[in-house]
Amino acid sequence: MKKVISLLLALATAVSVLAGCTETPGDTSADSTAGVTEPSPDTVTVTETEPETDTETETETETETEEDTETYFVPDEFTPVEDPDSFLIMPTLFSSHMVLQRDRKFYVWGRSNREGAIVRGTINGQVRYTTVQDGKWKLTFTPCPASAEPTEMLIEDECGNSALFEDVLFGDVWIINGQSNAELTLGQIVPKAGMPEFDDNEPIRILMQLGSTAMTYSGQQLKPQPELLSKMWQWKRASQSDMLASTALGFFFARHLAAQSGVPVGVISTAAASAMIQELMPKEIAEGFGFKAGSTALVAGYYNTLMHPFVGLQISGMIYFQGESESANNKSAKDYSKHVTAYFNELRARFGQDFPIYNVQLCSYTKASEGWLQYLRTLRVSQYTSYLQLDNCTLIPSYDLGPENGYADYMHSYKKEALAERIVKAVMAQQYGVGDANDCLSPEPVSAVLSADGKTVTVKFKNVGGGLTSTSGGASVAGFSIGTANKTKNCEAEIISADTVIVHAPDDAKTTMLAYAFENTVTEKNAQLYSSTGLPALAFMISPDAAQ
């Protein structure tokens, strides 16, 4: 119905195995059965090594394993002979405890200094071969169904190098991207939200990257990086220590989604505190909009260091929570819709997947934030506008999940579990077919008609559950305003049917735009419209149609 309104510290875990090496290797049990040599981040090359992405796109999470008709290369023989001067390098995005995307062909890649050497990969009974070409190699595996039963993946070459990855699961892989509210760790919210229980055997895994680390590597920010910045950035099981250091939103999302779907979930954090949109998007897109500088990073700095290493990885979808950095400037807030739309489209193109995106419509940050987040309401409208322009995108309101006035860390709400549950509810309905969109998504307008006398606007909604409700306790509902794009006046409104609200225009108002929740700080007093399932209506601004 949108059309109705909008017509890899080291840049690689270099599983670089020097056959016959006499040095005692460090602990490499997470990545390989052999020694590991790691290049310094200061000397890492920026030559791209990721594979070409599949040209087929995915429109939703597959519920059945796709058929694979590809013919795979099999050599006449594979007899490893030790070559002390050879190496086999893989990005650290491949590590023990990882989750690989279920039900799709998946790829494993890396580098070698032995041109033409044969590389073999074994997982789940599959054996695949490839050869090194131009210093790169890529293996393609047949789709595997979801499984919480740990398996192993062995990568080896004919030069005697090998790498073993243990405790590998097949499930759904999600990326979480944005700024501090996406990156915020579980440990940071525990003092207020409380300590959750942990189970190391829970079928969830998180790969946590740190924006603060990426921020210090300005040289690596200049070009897309083929590998992760730190060898410490590896997949982690759901232990207390590892989860407390991981994204809170990502942890709760993975926990609730895995529990409800019965499918293992892996989350990759590519977020960075204080990130601006031009730091997250690829350089070509940012420069096309005229961006010449960032704030905490270079233009495209966070894309190059935190996101680009994963291009070529099959994923299930992305959660996005960003925009606060643009809310301090009127032009940035107004232009945000075209910037984020272009960013999402470019990410999908680079990954070669039309993955679903769940974009969090910004929450409220208490009165304490209003001195500098002066255009938060405008930013929310831009998020709504972008949502209308994108397919396979869901807008998740969070304005009712901000911290209370007086909360010291007012820019970072501790209510991340409630937000995660809201996102999971939408994901289950749309990606797994569990639940109905009418019950699991937030109310949004499908039409708005201005009466002939200009005195009322009748607004019809979808996703209302059993019907629209107001936190006022009655039919009256606060939160609507009428006017122009720059200035609106609050209006009286009431629910007149299960899916319809009538809004009364002030006598002196210019009725060119209708807005809901057009406030920097949204509260129960100034935004009262909900579905019967307890989901708040999206914040929006639209132009009503004239009565026929």
Image (cartoon, rainbow, N blue to C red):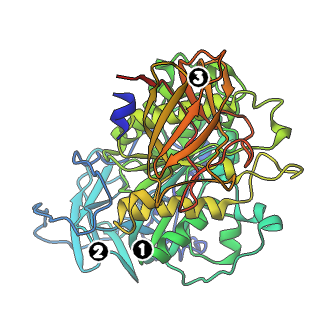
Label 3: few (<14), some or many (≥20) within 10 Å?
some
| Secondary structure beneath label 2 | loop
Residue pointed to by mark 2: 145
In percent of width and height, residue 267 lies at: 51, 62
For the question of whether residue 276 can be seen, the reply is: no
For the question of whether residue 393 can be seen, the reply is: yes
Label 2: few (<14), some or many (≥20) within 10 Å?
some
Residue 238's disc is: none
Residue pointed to by mark 1: 261
Which of labels 2 and 1 is toward the front? 1
- Looking at the image, residue 148 sits to the left or right of residue 422; the answer is left
Distance between the alpha carbons at the discs numbered 3 and 1: 38 Å
- Three-letter amino acid code of the residue under disc 3: Lys
Label located before the other in sequence (3 or 2)? 2
In percent of width and height, residue 425 lies at: 49, 63
Q: Residue at x 76, y 75 (%)?
A: 195
| Secondary structure beneath label 3 | helix
Pointers 2 and 1 in contact (CB under 8 A)?
no
